[in-house]
Image: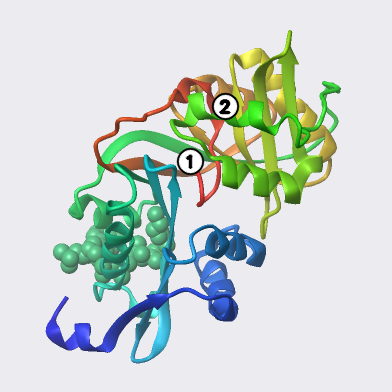
Amino acid sequence: MSDKIEKKCAVRLMQLADMEFLHRVVSIAGWNQIDTDWCRYIRFEPAGCFIAEYDDLPVGTVTTLCYESKIGWIGMLIVDPQARGLGIGSTLMRHAIDYLQHRVQVIKLDATLQGFPVYKKLGFKEEFEIIKLVGKGGNFAPANLPHISFELLPKIIEFDKIAFGASRETVLKQLLEEYQKFTFYEMHHGEIFGYIMATRGRQFWHIGPWVAKNPGIAENLLNALLMIGRGNRFVVDVPRVADASFSLCMVNGFVEQRKYVRMFLGLNKWPGDFSMVYGTGRAEKG
Ligand SMILES: CC(C)(COP(=O)(O)OP(=O)(O)OC[C@H]1O[C@@H](n2cnc3c(N)ncnc32)[C@H](O)[C@@H]1OP(=O)(O)O)[C@@H](O)C(=O)NCCC(=O)NCCS
């Protein structure tokens, strides 16, 4: 960034009072987040979500989240189209990285086509491809699965940790509080075999996390969710590590919308077991 631009660009903490701008950037980018998602991001990491200002006006956003002292997540990097190409995205990224670097050992994100070159220049490496699929709820064979209860949550968190690589306790607890009716799990002999969650979005309900021990369990979970969400539009981000979820969604009439690349910076010491991940979470979680 040139000296001239650097003087005009400042980075500060994101606040709930920024909601009008946050709402606007998501609409401009055509993303799926709603205002309550932003509230959640700020609540999870109040000192790690940033706004870039250019000429004293907000022009860009980025959020972070720490999972234990292991994995840090960067999400919601968006720059107003009129301010792109000025180094603002990179400046926000450097703030997010500075914040996370002392708190975690590896930093991860899901890169869009536009974000990819920015992250590559900052040293991020590719892990795997993720495909965004969109489809509709409908009348599927009822799987008759129970909703996740708060009593069961510790078991879900432990199960999820194997797949993700670190505990996502705070996030899963919060999502359960908000979306319990859109959660299901399958258990055999006291052991969790899979769970699924969905959250409301601007255009689509977002399926994920969707974690299962095998494709049969994954299918039961998806059917239960699509059944309860009859008539709604759904989106799911499918890692190409577990091709079975791609097939399951295709069978259910989902179509590909766009691709992402999971990337990481640092030592990928907690890769988790992504063969169990049929659908990833949203900006706050993988
Ligand atoms: C991705 C995004 C945040 C980049 O913001 P930005 O302020 O334009 O980025 P910068 O100006 O800091 O660019 C950083 C570098 O990447 C390069 N770059 C940026 N966009 C690029 C593109 N589409 N193709 C190739 N290179 C690109 C720039 O040339 C620059 O390189 P340089 O430092 O050598 O000049 C912005 O394009 C955006 O908001 N896109 C829509 C939302 C999105 O996809 N966000 C990413 C989520 S993963």
Residue 95 image position (x, y, % from top left): 30, 66
Graded by Cα atoms within 10 Å as few (under 14), some (14 to 19) or many (20 or more), the crowding at tag 1 reads many
Front position among marks 1 and 2: 2
269, above or below 101, in the image: above
Residue 98 image position (x, y, % from top left): 27, 60
- Residue 80 visible to the viewer: no
Extreme residue toward the top, this view:
189
- Numbered label attached to residue 162: none
Alpha-carbon span between mark 1 and mark 2: 16 Å
Identify residue for label 1. 286
The amino acid at mark 1 is Gly
Residue 113 image position (x, y, % from top left): 36, 51
Q: Identify the element where label 1 is drawn.
A: loop
> Looking at the image, what colour scheme do you see?
rainbow
Residue pictured at 62% horizontal, 42% vertical: 172
- Residue 27 visible to the viewer: yes
Q: Quadrant of residue 75?
A: bottom left
Count of numbered marks: 2
Q: Quadrant of residue 61?
A: bottom left
229 relative to 40 in the view: left or right: right
Comes first in the chain, label 1 or label 2:
2
Residue 29 image position (x, y, % from top left): 50, 65
Identify residue for label 2. 158
Q: Quadrant of residue 187?
A: top right
Graded by Cα atoms within 10 Å as few (under 14), some (14 to 19) or many (20 or more), the crowding at tag 2 reads some
